Image: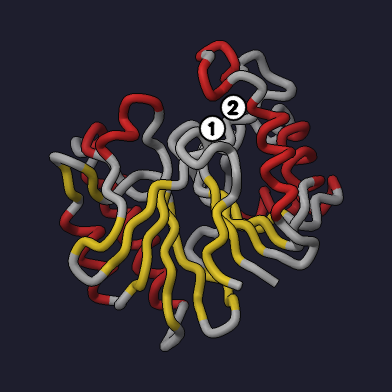
Amino acid sequence: MALFVIGDTHLSLASNKPMDVFGGGWEGYVDKLREGFQAVGPEDTVVLCGDLSWGMSLEEAEADFAFLDSLPGVRKLMLKGNHDYWWNTASKMNRFFAEKGFSTLKILHNNCYEYGEYALCGTRGWFYEEKGDQKVFNRELIRLEASLKAAGERKKLCFLHYPPLYQGYRCAEIIALLEKYEVEACYYGHLHGGSHRLAVEGKYGPVVYHLVAADYVGFQPQKILE
């Protein structure tokens, strides 16, 4: 049993927005994802850090969910990205997954999941481009703290879509929560292409940070724990 993480799969199997048009590392990215997931075992858990499907609704994203569900791993914990327009209430998403038989897909939202001695926590997070909407920002802080509180006394790993910090930017409120609840490591996505150079990798204060956007990690889920 092992724990993996990857973000930003940007699938578009039933909608017309494939990432291959950007060229470079995105060419053939669906096949690259399928190959990369071969490192994942049938009893392993994978956290998916948002921007999973370009579908505009659960129905339009169904083919992308089917692809993710078919990949190795007993659990795929999904959190929201800024392009996950299909995202709905947890009850509607869980019901849709159950009706379609997507047994490995789980929602990481206002909750946490246990993995050995660890708790897996997370939410979408926040980004400077949206700083003007204070209500949305406050809701993200509430969701993150709810997830961290749900972990209790377990060791904590946190998963976000938006980077809580990178060169020239830091979200002090989110970083403060990570440090308050003694999160050991934080994994995030969202940064692509030339923005990779802005990523913070390694320890910042007491927390270790890692960028796990699919194009940054070569479309290979990254092993965190055995």
Q: Position of residue 187 (x, y in %)?
A: 41, 55
In space, the residues marked 1 and 2 are separated at their CA atoms by 7 Å
User: Mark 1 falls on what kind of element?
Assistant: loop
Dot 2 alpha-carbon crowd within 10 angstroms: few under 14, some 14 to 19, many 20 or more: many
Q: Residue furthest left?
A: 168
- Image quarter where the N terminus lies is bottom right
Q: Position of residue 81 (x, y in %)?
A: 47, 40
**Residue highlighted by disc 2:** 54
Asked if the residues shown at circle 1 and circle 2 are in contact, with their CB atoms under 8 angstroms apart, the answer is yes
Q: Which amino acid type corresponds to the residue marked 2 in the rendered image?
A: Trp
Q: Nearer the viewer, residue 10 or 201?
A: 201
Q: Position of residue 147 (x, y in %)?
A: 43, 69
Q: Position of residue 96 (x, y in %)?
A: 76, 47
Q: Residue at horizontal 40%, vertical 69%?
A: 146
Which disc number belongs to residue 85? Answer: 1
Q: Residue at horizontal 39%, vertical 26%?
A: 193
Q: Residue at horizontal 74%, vertical 22%?
A: 14
Q: Which amino acid type corresponds to the residue marked 1 in the rendered image?
A: Tyr
